[in-house]
């Protein structure tokens, strides 16, 4: 996750600033005369920022151009104006061009150029305004021959150092490979279709794949419609490639096959190597060495009813100190995974390779083998288990008065579900929770009430975006989709975990120990402006400026509360936000409105938390299993990798849900449904079916015979002739026209007539300022496909 935070006073290599200045002065495109010690023109400054992304802080820019005194004040004002104009944005402590790649990026190598050079693109690209930039992969022939540099090929995923390209006319960046993360596999996943006379063909699940022939002797008894994994056996000069079936996963009608598609498509490691399983099986129970005995403290676990592992336990009690009247002591204990998963072990390498556990409706792809996650590190009821615990003291106003970390041996007093604990507090205890109500549960809820006061004062971002859960039938198909009730029991555990995470980051900072932060940057100025323009159409204002806070957005959400456009505003605010990542440098967590934050509470399922545990062990002298100097040196790389793996898991989970719902609705083509417009693009509308949590697309060519115009500010498509249209958040009635289960795709036809667009929008259209996609096209024709 992250590395030792860099000292902002750290200087670049001797002479680097002068070299960069000379390069800027010598740039062919520069016509102005640059005077050392004078603030450079805007275009020179922009070029310097683009070409020196790692040395583009205000301090480094001033140093490179020899600025002092008043010139530094003038530079600060110029940089602020560039930010306000959206020409640069702040990332960490440096300024970058909007959409610029970070210095270290995970790339997928996709093609070769006409010269045979490898070209990659970012594995995850979050800029919705354009195509991911191409990156030229530099591989030294000498270095490869001597085995000194990693060798990559087409289809590989690599961690790379990024440099702005010096030559114009080609890719915007070049890259040097640091590490090959995933090599291209020869295994292919697809649907087996039997052919008369034996054998068959493989229909790939990848849209870019091609059919493959399977000879009769290599079918491995696969049946028509089975999802299979094949090995490309040989490639002939003519005709289709041939393959041999390696694994028959099952019928594509089963849910198991659908989640397996996502696992394969996203390259998620799901089979533990034998050496990893052997290492896990050989692990012994932890001893009392370097541990405090907390087995008498009645810690309890509160988890989903179907949870198989329990990595956190909680306890609360009134603070007996006379210095803290009305205060509370909250204790959070987390499974001590660092004791079992040591640096450089087989378990550690495999955990980093996975980055996190991945959760599907029917299965979990765990980060660690069951022997570790579901046994030795699961805080089972009534069983001795090692843990790292943090004891936190809060005043009655919810202000933290202090905290301490401990390496302990604990024994969970009870395993409870959220619903079970909530029912007891609500007056309906069962046989298990009845005896726990007064001594354990009520003090916990009192602790939560105190923590809630601090949360209200902190004002984190309060988006109302309910999560849907798919309930499966015994045969693995979809039974129903529901929105689980949000209980105080959920909020209690969430707030206590947040406070434990904050305490971990604070302790490691105080000890000047390397750590990985969980950071969340404020929205970019460009996304702020897009949101501001949209809100203006609803007569809702959003403050301007680069120093936004979460409560600014909460004010917007409060204005929309209870209004017809409430859901629409919540979605647009969510889209405006940056994505949280792991980083060695702290920029705070915008959404939670916290200055320092690190993931500590789930080391069973997140590698980031395991690193933080190791950092605490070494920083506090808590015994074995601490962070090593070698790990500290590569935390930057680890942070980049696990941030990518987190996004990979999210994409796989989302794709599986899409395929499940498409499979569930495949037999209902032609039926009508109530939906809501969830996305507006130049190519058409995305519509969500709230009852299923499913998204489908309506091409603009099928909306009607009117000439539809895309209005980005209003997030709408409106007819030029009729003035009728559709806007983000509109309730609509649609008919399911097509379902493609393997692709997870739904296509709808619009049944609802569009509503009258606001006067401001109609005047906008009459002014002739139309989206160029529709220019010159007859009504009802389909424009180029947009990006979702």
Image: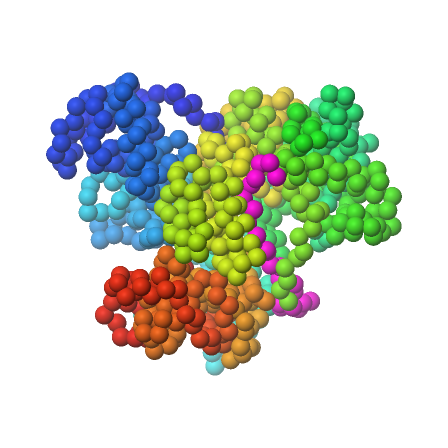
For residue 275, above or below residue 92: below
For residue 606, above or below residue 788: above
Q: Which is the main secondary structure of the residues drawn in magenta?
A: loop
Locate residue 745, reporting x and y percent.
47, 67
Locate residue 132, reporting x and y percent.
34, 50
Front-most of 151 and 317? Answer: 317
Does the stretch in magenta take in 220? Answer: no
Locate residue 442, reporting x and y percent.
79, 40
User: Is 204 situated left or right of 782 in this image?
Assistant: right
Q: Is residue 275 visible?
A: no
For residue 661, above or below residue 503: below
Q: Is residue 733 visible?
A: yes
Front-most of 555 and 226? Answer: 555
Q: Residue at position x 41%, y 70% from top? A: 756
Residue 201 image-quadrant placement: bottom left
Residue 386 image-quadrant placement: top right
Q: Residue at position x 39%, y 39% from top? A: 545
**Which residues are drawn in magenta?**
456-479
**How is the structure coloured here?**
rainbow
Front-most of 660 and 235? Answer: 660
Quadrant assignment for the C terminus = bottom left
User: Is 140 situated left or right of 5 in this image?
Assistant: left
Q: Residue at position x 30%, y 30% from top? A: 77
**Number of numbered discs on residues:** 0
Q: Residue at position x 60%, y 59% from top? A: 468
Does the stretch in magenta take in 457? Answer: yes
Locate residue 564, reporting x and y percent.
52, 61
Residue 255 image-quadrant placement: bottom right
Front-most of 270 and 220? Answer: 270
């Amino acid at each position: 996750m992250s590395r030792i935070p860099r000292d902002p006073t750290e200087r670049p290599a001797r002479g680097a600033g002068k070299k960069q200045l000379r390069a800027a002065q010598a740039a062919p495109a520069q016509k102005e005369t640059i005077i050392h010690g004078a603030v450079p023109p805007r275009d020179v400054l922009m070029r310097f920022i683009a070409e020196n992304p790692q040395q583009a802080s205000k301090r480094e820019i001033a140093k490179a151009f020899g600025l002092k005194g008043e010139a530094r004040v003038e530079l600060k004002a110029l940089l602020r104006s560039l930010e306000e104009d959206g020409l640069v944005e702040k990332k960490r402590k440096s300024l970058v061009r909007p959409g610029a790649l970070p210095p270290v990026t995970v790339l997928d190598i996709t093609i070769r150029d006409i010269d045979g050079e490898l070209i990659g693109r970012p594995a995850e690209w979050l800029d919705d305004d354009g195509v991911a930039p191409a990156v030229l992969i530099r591989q030294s022939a000498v270095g490869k021959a001597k085995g000194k540099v990693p060798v990559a090929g087409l289809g590989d995923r690599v961690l790379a150092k990024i440099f702005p390209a010096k030559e114009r006319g080609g890719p915007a960046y070049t890259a040097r490979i640091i590490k090959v993360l995933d090599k291209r596999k020869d295994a292919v996943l697809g649907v087996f279709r039997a052919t008369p006379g034996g054998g068959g063909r493989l229909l790939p699940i990848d849209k870019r794949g091609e059919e493959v022939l399977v000879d009769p002797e290599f079918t491995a008894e696969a049946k028509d419609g089975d999802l299979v994994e094949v090995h490309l056996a040989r490639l002939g000069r003519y005709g289709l490639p041939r393959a041999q079936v390696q694994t028959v996963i099952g019928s594509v009608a089963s849910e198991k096959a659908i989640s397996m598609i996502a696992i394969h498509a996203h390259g998620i490691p799901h089979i533990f190597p034998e050496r990893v399983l052997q290492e896990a099986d050989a692990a012994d129970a932890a001893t009392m060495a370097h541990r405090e005995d907390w087995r008498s403290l009645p810690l309890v676990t509160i988890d989903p009813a179907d949870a198989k592992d329990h990595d956190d336990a909680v306890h609360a009690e009134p603070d007996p100190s006379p210095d803290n009247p009305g205060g509370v002591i909250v204790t959070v204990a987390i499974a001590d995974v660092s004791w079992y998963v040591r640096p450089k072990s087989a378990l550690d390498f495999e955990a980093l390779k996975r980055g996190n556990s991945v959760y599907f409706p029917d299965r979990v792809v765990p980060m660690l083998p069951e022997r570790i996650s579901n046994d030795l590190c699961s805080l089972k009821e009534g069983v001795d288990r090692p843990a790292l615990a943090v004891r936190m003291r809060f005043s009655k106003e919810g202000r933290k008065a202090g905290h301490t970390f401990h390496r302990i041996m604990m024994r969970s007093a009870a395993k409870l579900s959220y619903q079970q604990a909530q029912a007891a507090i609500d007056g309906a205890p069962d046989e298990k929770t009845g005896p726990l109500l007064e001594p354990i549960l009520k003090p916990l809820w009192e602790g939560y009430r105190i923590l809630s006061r601090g949360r209200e004062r902190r004002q984190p971002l309060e988006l109302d975006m309910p999560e849907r859960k798919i309930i499966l039938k015994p045969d693995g198909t979809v039974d129903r989709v529901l929105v689980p009730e949000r209980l105080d029991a959920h909020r209690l555990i969430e707030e206590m975990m947040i406070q434990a995470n904050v305490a971990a980051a604070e302790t490691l900072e105080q000890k000047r120990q390397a750590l990985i932060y969980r950071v969340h940057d404020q929205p970019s100025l460009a996304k702020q402006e897009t949101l501001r323009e949209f809100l203006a159409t609803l007569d809702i204002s959003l403050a301007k400026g680069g120093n936004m806070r979460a409560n600014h957005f909460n004010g917007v959400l409060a204005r929309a509360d209870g209004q017809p456009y409430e859901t629409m505003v919540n979605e647009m605010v969510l889209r405006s936000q940056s994505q949280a990542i792991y980083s060695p440098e702290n920029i705070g967590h915008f959404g939670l409105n916290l200055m320092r934050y690190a993931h500590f509470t789930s080391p069973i399922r997140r590698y980031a938390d395991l690193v933080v545990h190791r950092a605490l062990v070494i920083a506090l002298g808590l015994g074995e299993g601490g962070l090593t100097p070698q790990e500290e040196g590569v935390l930057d790389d680890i942070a980049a990798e696990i941030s990518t793996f987190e996004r990979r898991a999210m994409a796989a989970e989302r794709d599986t849900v899409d395929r499940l719902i498409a499979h569930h609705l495949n037999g209902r083509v032609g039926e009508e449904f109530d939906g809501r417009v969830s996305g507006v693009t130049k190519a058409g509308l995305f519509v969500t079916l709230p009852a299923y949590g499913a998204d489908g697309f309506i091409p603009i060519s099928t909306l009607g015979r009117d000439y539809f115009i895309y209005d980005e500010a209003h997030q709408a498509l409106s007819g030029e002739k009729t003035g009728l249209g559709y806007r983000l958040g509109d309730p609509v009635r649609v008919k399911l026209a097509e379902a493609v289960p393997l692709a997870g795709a739904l296509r709808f036809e619009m049944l609802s007539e569009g509503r009258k667009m606001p006067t401001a929008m109609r005047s906008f259209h009459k002014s002739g300022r139309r989206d160029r996609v529709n220019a010159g096209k007859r009504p009802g024709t389909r424009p180029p496909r947009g990006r979702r």
